[in-house]
């Protein structure tokens, strides 16, 4: 269905894995082009001419229409599939949890993981922020854990795009120094997400094949 669309992705990113999880679960084929964030390729003119915000993931449709934001891309790819909740309130709850992910989880888990795990040479410069991100992220994880103590999945007791969005950085939280083992409802839910059809780990879904900006012209 989307085989003529192009998905711009980078490696190891909880945001970038979301659209790939949707594709994998639903059997959607997309062209993939890899952008090396660590080498600064997101901010080079070749990529800025595609996405002026200079971030990935980013989707360009066959007719040239463009879409940014991992959760919006995941939703678009999941449209008309069982990954979209069936009821109006279910869809609204999915948006609510996807916004929660972008405001309470991702802005805390992603930067602390980046400066301590992906690029630890940045840890000293971010020394003051590390405990702040960990404290704020832990508060978000507590809210998520409380929700999952009463629910198998984020919305309507069914695996949906909201689970994929929230899973993106939550399953990487240990790499940011978060103690996930103290959140049993989250770790049980992670197991349920990882049992879904088509599931593959981030290392496979974002394997960085042909990982160079030269591919932008390909
Ligand atoms: N809210 C955006 C965040 C996108 C974002 O910040 N992506 C990071 C990778 S996870 C990026 O491209 N960083 C490159 C840069 O800042 O140059 C989303 O969910 O897609």
Image (cartoon, rainbow, N blue to C red):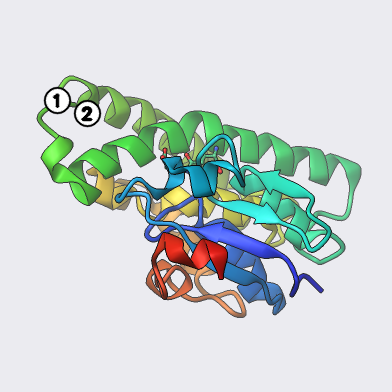
In screen coordinates, is 56 left or right of 108? right
Q: Say the numbered circle drawn on residue 41.
A: none
Whether residues under marks 1 and 2 lie with C-beta atoms below 8 angstroms apart, the answer is: yes
Identify the residue under disc 2: 130
Write the residue at 55% across / 64% down.
217
Name the quarter where the C terminus is drawn.
bottom right
Badge 2 element: helix
In screen coordinates, is 178 left or right of 78? left
Using the image as rendered, state which of residue 29 and residue 39 is in the foreground: 39
The crowd level at tag 1 (other Cα within 10 Å; few <14, some 14-19, many 20+) is few
Using the image as rendered, state which of residue 133 and residue 20 is in the foreground: 20
Using the image as rendered, state which of residue 124 and residue 87 is in the foreground: 124
Q: Is residue 11 visible?
A: yes
Write the residue at 43% across / 49% down.
170
Give coordinates of residue 214: x percent, y percent: 44, 64
Q: Quadrant of residue 78?
A: bottom right
Write the residue at 65% across / 44% down.
68
Give coordinates of residue 10: x percent, y percent: 44, 58
Q: Is residue 149 visible?
A: no
């Amino acid at each position: 269905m989307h085989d003529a669309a192009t998905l711009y992705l980078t490696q190891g990113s909880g945001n970038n894995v979301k659209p790939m999880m949707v594709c994998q679960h639903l059997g959607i084929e997309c062209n993939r082009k890899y952008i090396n964030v660590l080498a600064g390729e997101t901010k080079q003119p070749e990529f800025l001419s595609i996405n002026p915000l200079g971030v990935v993931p980013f989707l360009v449709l066959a007719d040239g229409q463009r879409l940014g934001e991992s959760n919006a891309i995941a939703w678009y790819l999941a449209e008309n599939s069982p990954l979209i909740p069936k009821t109006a309130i279910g869809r609204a709850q999915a948006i609510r949890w996807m916004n929660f992910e972008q405001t309470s989880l991702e802005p805390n888990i992603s930067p602390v993981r980046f400066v301590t795990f992906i690029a630890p040479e940045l840890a000293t410069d971010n020394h003051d922020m590390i405990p702040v991100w960990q404290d704020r992220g832990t508060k978000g994880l507590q809210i998520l854990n409380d929700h999952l103590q009463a629910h198998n999945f984020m919305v309507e007791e069914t695996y949906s795009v909201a689970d994929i969005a929230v899973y993106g950085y939550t399953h990487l939280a240990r790499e940011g120094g978060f103690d996930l083992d103290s959140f049993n409802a989250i770790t049980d839910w992670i197991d349920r997400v990882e049992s879904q059809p088509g599931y593959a780990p981030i290392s496979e879904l974002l394997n960085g094949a042909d990982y160079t900006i030269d591919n932008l012209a390909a």
